Image (spheres, rainbow, N blue to C red):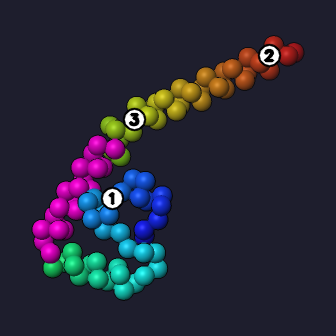
Amino acid sequence: GDTPAIREVLTDREDVWLCPLGDEEALADALMTLRQDRRTRERIAHGGHTLFRRRLSTKALAPKIGEIVRAAIERSSEAGNRAISRR
């Protein structure tokens, strides 16, 4: 469904076809359009695949996840050191 959170990652008609949440008619229309329009269907599929590879694949996310884990370990270590120094 089309939400602000989804639009932070996906772009309507470039890498996804967004429909208003709960709008069955819009969803049906989108599906029929994509079924009948091969060029649009292939363009959006290519855009989605490209987005996935560049921003959402394991290879793309691993460095970011590593940074988050390292920061959490550092915060945990610092908190532990503070607790020990208070004793």
Rendering quarter of residue 12: bottom left
Residue 84's tag is: 2
Q: Nearer the viewer, residue 36 or 77?
A: 36
Q: For the residue labelled by badge 3, is the local secondary structure a helix, a strand or a loop? A: helix
Q: Nearer the viewer, residue 23 or 74?
A: 23
Residue 2 appears left or right of 84: left
Mark 2 Cα-neighbour bin, 10 Å: few <14, some 14–19, many ≥20 = few
* Amino acid type assigned to the residue bearing label 1 in the image: Thr
Q: Quadrant of the N terminus?
A: bottom left
Where 1 sits versus 73, above or below? Answer: below
| Residue lying at 43% horizontally and 53% vertically, measured from the top left | 8
Residue named by callout 3: 62
Residue 53's tag is: none
* Amino acid type assigned to the residue bearing label 2 in the image: Ile
Q: Quadrant of the C terminus?
A: top right
Residue 28 covered by magenta stretch: no
Q: Main secondary structure of the magenta part?
A: helix
Rendering quarter of residue 16: bottom left
Where 41 sits versus 61, above or below? Answer: below
| Residue lying at 48% horizontally and 29% vertically, measured from the top left | 67
Q: For the residue labelled by badge 2, is the local secondary structure a helix, a strand or a loop? A: helix
N-term-proximal mark, 1 vs 3: 1
Q: For the residue labelled by badge 1, is the local secondary structure a helix, a strand or a loop? A: loop
Residue 20 appears left or right of 30: right
Residue 3 appears left or right of 19: right
| Residue lying at 15% horizontally and 75% vertically, measured from the top left | 37
Residue named by callout 1: 11
